[in-house]
Amino acid sequence: MNNEILMILKNSKKLEEIKRIAQKYGVRLTSSVVLSIVMLLASGSAYQNDQDMKSVDLEITDDTFITKSIDKLGAFSTVALNLKINFEEVRELTWDEKIEIILDKFELSREQLDVCCAIACAEANGEGMNYEEAVNVICTAYNRIISAAWVNSLGDNLYGQMTAPGQFVVYENGNYLRFLGRIDLVGYQAVIDFLSNQCELKGHNYLSFRSNDSNIDGEELVKGGNLYFNELSDEDRLADKRVLEEVTRVLS
């Protein structure tokens, strides 16, 4: 590892900026992922020397060694999105802060975000009172905006995907209207937590679901909940170019 990379890692201002970008775009950071970002952006190669890693003034975890198998810059998002935030100084966000992160990250208006939350509540079993199933529903929609096939078909906007014809039946039949503005519901809160990267639940890789009484071969993630199918493959997964572009700017 060259001296330039070590200097970047030891620059607290740059690390703070990387954390801000990651939180803004919903990338779950660990100290190892910060190291991964720098290495990938600097050379696109695996680590040259384990001793070099230990010399960095960061808490290095076993996750660091995952990056040894990464040979493409675009693979960063796949790894990072499956790792949890590990920085003790990251404080819990307020409701308004979560909303602002989501509006900025997904380029939504408050009205559009409200519709997305209402659709997720209506599609989740329990009338908006099932936190886990609401997460599963909104995760399905999120997976579609990081799927090359779905983006090519319906675009990369979350609201656009969720309101497109033939996609979410509760939007087309108007059932979602009952949940507009229902921020008191745990399902509504679940959507906000997930989209602002403040959710403790791990997301899934499914792109589609049907109701529990459907005659399909799907996975029931929550007892009595929807049946999920059609997994997002690594080949179809899009890297979040917005994250990479901003991190590149910070490190340049």
Image (cartoon, rainbow, N blue to C red):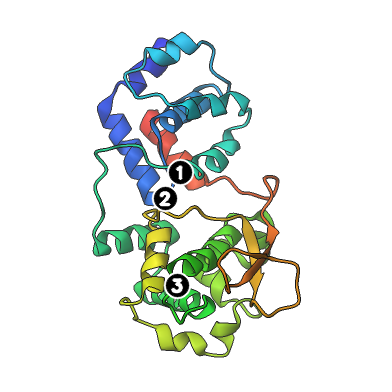
Mark 3 against mark 1, which lies toward the viewer? 3
| For residue 144, side relative to residue 3 (left or right) | right
Query: Is 249 placed above or below 105 here?
Result: above
Label 1 sits on what residue type? Val
Mark on residue 130? Answer: 3
Q: Nearer the viewer, residue 20 or 56?
A: 56
Q: Position of residue 30 (x, y in %)?
A: 40, 35
Query: Is 193 placed above or below 75 here?
Result: below
Give the mark nearest the N terminus, 3 or 1.
3
Q: CA distance from mark 2 to mark 3?
A: 25 Å
Q: Residue furthest front?
A: 223
Mark 2 against mark 3, which lies toward the viewer? 3
Give the mark nearest the N terminus, 2 or 3.
2
Number of residues whose C-alpha sits closer than 10 Å to that of mark 2, classed few (under 14), some (14–19) or many (20 or more): some
Give the mark nearest the N terminus, 1 or 2.
2
* Mark 1 lies on residue: 243
Mark on residue 146? Answer: none
Label 3 sits on what residue type? Asn
